[in-house]
Amino acid sequence: MTQFCGYDCCTEKAMQYLTLEPGKVPEALKLYAEAFQAKLVDDSYEDQSVQLKILNSYVLITPWVSASGSSDSFLELPTDLNSIRRIREDKRFVEIDRTSSTENKRVMMKDPFGITFLLRMEKKKMTRYVVDHGLLFRRACNPIAFGFPQGISPNDLCTIKLTALFVTRYGMGFRMALKKIASTEFGFLNLNHIWRRLFFNFVGVYTSIVKPSEVVYRSCDFMGKALELFFHLLQLKNVKMGGSRTVMEVDAFTGGVDYFAYMDFVGYSDVMPRPQRRSVMIAQLGHNTLRTPLSASWCTTIFFVSPEVLGIIKLTALFVARYGKRIACELMEKVGRNPLFSFLDPSDCGFPCYNMVVKVYSKVLKNFELVYTADIVLQRYFQSLWDEEKDEPKDLDDLYSFVECVDSFAQMEDEEFFHKMGCRQANLLRNSLIDHQAHVYPFHDQTSRVSFRDQNSPANVQDEGPSSIKVCVPTLDGRVIIEIIVESFFGEKVASLKEKIVKLIQIPSKYLKLRGKSVGVLRDDKSLADNNVEAREILTATWRFSRWEVEIA
């Protein structure tokens, strides 16, 4: 055995051996690929032996030399608890014996070829340099016993879940930033808090569904965008007051990933209810309603698909990103020439849209391919898509709400996807904000901006008289917009302008950043003119942190 990044990995010295009837080898390979996610390592042996990686072990399968040959028919496979539970439920295997039955840590199974498998829970080691939050969850508690501290309220639970989801996606840097700007609001992040373990439990759950972001440390201000989206969704003041509508909006946002947790994560469904559809939540509210999902359709003029078809495209792409492209092939065979699914045809005008969505969703979701048969996945897909009572697709907003979490992460991280999927809504919201102070659209600073009302002032004239500047800044609580008017001129230092702004809002000046279109973050010790701010240019105002900012030279 060797160590790699703190985990035990099998080598050639740990090779295990099987012998089978020659005619049974292809069937066995197919079974092991489906049941164990086995991968072919080498099939170039002269004796037609095949080397596989089954779970975390290497196995050499050799055909019998003769019909009277003997069989090596025992394998010991270290694996995780999820795999043990999944294989126990596979009807193709017969359970022979089980030890530690309450936790299912050691199970002996027999396959149709007479091979006996001892599946045991593998104890993994971690170095201090590698942190696997999924492993932290598995070591923290038995999933069957996964539960909540007594007295936790729905608003506290939704806050913990949303925070865990963002920490899973954007790493411990997001957690540190959250503690920096709102240290008293998220006590469960502290070391000795009673709900800290619950928080990491959810991190472990979401780690099995959502990938870590690849762009969070590439962009100088991306962490700030993630924080804006987080507070936009949470609306902390309303959540603290116990508003059921706000809690439902958070639950609607996480509904898609919670569905995958409910279906795919062992033990989650024992303690958590199945996520409700958005329309069901609205029915419980009576006269109130929920905000429009951020994934709603605004791109029909680009891809020439209707909002209804786009909703189906996004739901299909979500399942394909999660369960593999084989699902799309099986779906094409099942639906035939149904025009609702014509986008699956590469010659259809909707295929580029579908292909793009699959690509960006695959950057967010972890692949869970070969765990379930295609029939099981398609059954879940149609349950999520189709209203059997009405014999038509479900409410359109239900579809958009189901994909909202993954779609929002994708829009925030992929500029091209955002401009094709989200820019029209952002522009409509931006225009309405000026007159109605509506909700903030959190992606790419579309509404957080500083605009010059006197757009004729030349940027290179430092002794120009004062001009009125309108500032729109999102608050830490989320969607509330503060609109103020300050007097400034191009020769004034940026630091002085920021002091005028912070007198009217509750964001410390050290956290407030002003950005230009092409010059990045404005230097506080220089004037607007020295920062090369141009006439008619729209600046952005936001709260960022120096750790993630790169100021212009």
Image (cartoon, rainbow, N blue to C red):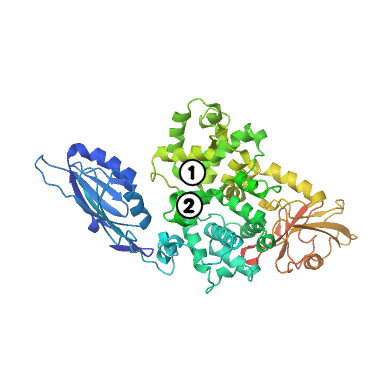
The quadrant in which residue 298 appears is: top right
Whether residue 468 is situated above or below residue 292 in the rendered picture: below
Q: Amino acid at mark 2?
A: Ala
Residue 1 higher or lower than 53, as above or below: below
Q: How busy is the neighbourhood of tag 1: few (under 14 within 10 Å), some, or many (20 plus)?
A: many
Q: Which callout, 1 or 2, points to the residue nearer the camera?
A: 2
Residue for point 44% across, 29% down: 333
Of all residues, the one furthest to the bottom in this rendering is 192
In percent of width and height, residue 198 lies at 50, 65
Which residue position is annotated with label 2?
261
Q: Position of residue 301 (x, y in %)?
A: 67, 33
The residue most toward the right is 465
Q: Nearer the viewer, residue 40 or 168?
A: 168
Q: Amino acid at mark 1?
A: Ala
Cα distance in 3D space between marks 1 and 2: 15 Å
The vertical placement of 10 against 367, above or below, is: below
Q: Is residue 345 above or below residue 141?
A: above
Q: Nearer the viewer, residue 82 or 229?
A: 82
Label 1: which residue? 321
